[in-house]
Amino acid sequence: MKLSSLHDFIDLFYPQLCFGCGRPLLRNENIICFHCKFGLPFTDFHKIQENKIHQLFTGRIQIEKASAYLHFVKNGMVQSLLHYLKYRNKDQIGIYLGKMAGKDLAKDNFFEGLNHIIPIPLHPKKLKLRKYNQAEKIAFGLAETSGVQMETQLLLRSKFNETQTRKSRFNRWLNVEAIFTIDPEIRGEFKGKHLLLVDDVVTTGSTLEAAAILLEKELQCKISIFTIAIA
């Protein structure tokens, strides 16, 4: 039996389903169907210098570029995709979204001048429970399509903090204060570099702000920010 025929046979009984609408995917579709893909709530922030992400951090930290790829709507498709990514072991969704975003951002030279992509790390305890870091999967997809190297050892999470869900902006900041450290053995390699911090969703920006403050202080580097979604 030819490989394509074997795949057709398997798909007949165990079809891959769209993570957006739940319908069976066609052979040339992946992760989400074409209908759902083109129905995603794109922000186009990467085309606007003073966008909502950039404004969110104005007066808090100095950033070079900032963008979020999609709007996060409660009970919407983006929430469903990120739920599968974070809690249902569907890490391929992060890579897929990262690649898709990377291709679009590259068209507008968003990655120009960047030296490294830095995913926001998970604490080892949470990483052990989740088995992978969703931000790292997104960053991997970005690196694949942008050609900018991903670095996962520089920024470390030293404090196991509580979930940010349902916390106020002030309490979110208290919850993330001093949760990151920098690997002293490799820090010299990143002094003065332009780093892109990557996370899955930005709400108040407290976690990204804490990471950016530390990196700027210790490495005198430039910081840019990207997330898949803005809530």
Image: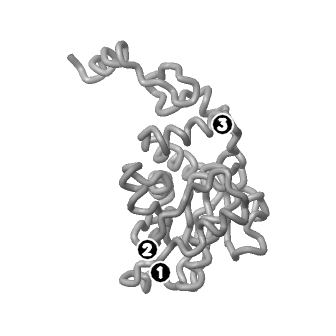
Q: Which mark is residue 190?
A: 1
Image coordinates for residue 139, horizontal then vertical, percent: 49, 57
Mark 1 element type: helix
Image coordinates for residue 119, horizontal then vertical, percent: 50, 62
Label 1 crowd (10 A; few <14 / some 14-19 / many >=20): some
Mark 3 element type: loop
Label 2 crowd (10 A; few <14 / some 14-19 / many >=20): some
Q: Residue at left 50%, top 48%?
A: 99
Q: Could you give the CA–CA distance between mark 3 and mark 1, rounded to whole angstroms?
A: 35 Å
Q: Could you give the CA–CA distance between mark 2 and mark 3, rounded to whole angstroms?
A: 33 Å
Instruction: Inspect the image, locate mark 2, and give the three-letter code of the amino acid beneath it.
Output: Leu
Image coordinates for residue 230, horizontal then vertical, percent: 68, 51
| Residue at image mark 3 | 40
Q: Residue at left 29%, top 17%?
A: 5
Q: Residue at left 36%, top 83%?
A: 185
Label 3 crowd (10 A; few <14 / some 14-19 / many >=20): some
Of mark 2 and mark 3, the one earlier in the sequence is 3
Question: Decide: marks 2, 1 in contact (CB < 8 A)?
Answer: yes
* Marks 2, 1: nearer the viewer: 2
Q: Which mark is residue 154?
A: 2
